[in-house]
């Protein structure tokens, strides 16, 4: 026959092992940190190479479509007025890039060359394509 202390120790040890297993499973699945949906989305987008394209310098809509399909693409628009940005977003929507392939929040705008430089420095991209330079 087991003493009450032995039974209590056995129950406590079983609970501790169970909690440790639940923690390891939740850590492996990613529930405790970012949630399963966010983690799978992050993993999917991180497999694609990240590029930034200044679309003022690109006249080829097919090239933009290919970049949007095969890369994690951020678009940069040099525009002096908000109306110019709206016009560009409308054009991108008409050719099927925004919001189907690139979310609208990944279309950035600025009005100066220095602004383009500042934005590109903040983005974690591997390749920047623009008229002044191609930076890898």
Image: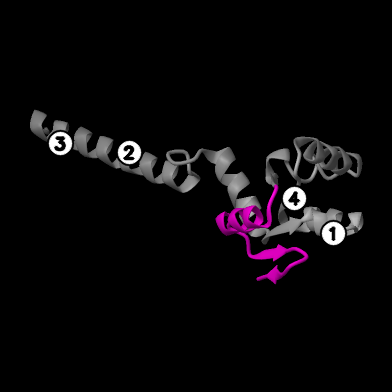
Residue 78's disc is 4
Query: Magenta residues?
Result: 111-136
Q: Secondary structure at mark 3?
A: helix
Residue, disc 3: 9
Q: Secondary structure at mark 4?
A: strand
Which of 66/7 is in front?
Answer: 66
How far is disc 4 from disc 2 in space, using C-alphas?
A: 57 Å
Residue 58's disc is 1
Residue, disc 2: 18
Check disc 2: other Cα within 10 Å, few if <14, some if 14-19, many if 20+. Answer: few
Q: Is residue 33 left or right of residue 103?
A: left
Q: Quadrant of residue 36?
A: top right
- The residue lying at 62 percent from left, 45 percent from top is 41
Q: Nearer the viewer, mark 4 or mark 2?
A: 4
One can see residue 20 in this view: yes
Return the disc, 4 or 1, that comes first in the chain's sequence: 1
Q: Secondary structure at mark 2?
A: helix
Q: Is residue 115 magenta?
A: yes
Check disc 1: other Cα within 10 Å, few if <14, some if 14-19, many if 20+. Answer: few
Q: Secondary structure at mark 1?
A: loop
Q: Nearer the viewer, mark 2 or mark 1?
A: 1
The N terminus sits in image quarter: top left
């Amino acid at each position: 026959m087991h003493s009450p202390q032995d039974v209590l120790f056995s129950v406590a040890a079983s609970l501790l092992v169970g909690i440790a297993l639940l923690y390891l499973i939740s850590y492996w699945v990613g529930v405790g940190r970012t949630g399963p949906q966010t983690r799978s989305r992050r993993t999917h987008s991180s497999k694609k190479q990240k590029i930034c394209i200044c679309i003022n310098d690109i006249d080829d809509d097919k090239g933009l479509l290919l970049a949007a399909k095969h890369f994690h693409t951020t678009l940069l628009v040099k525009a002096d007025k908000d109306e110019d940005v709206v016009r560009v977003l409308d054009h991108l929507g008409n050719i099927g890039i925004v919001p189907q392939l690139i979310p609208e929040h990944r279309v950035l705008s600025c009005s100066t060359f220095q602004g383009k430089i500042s934005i590109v420095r903040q983005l974690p991209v591997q390749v920047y394509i623009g008229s002044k330079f191609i930076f890898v």
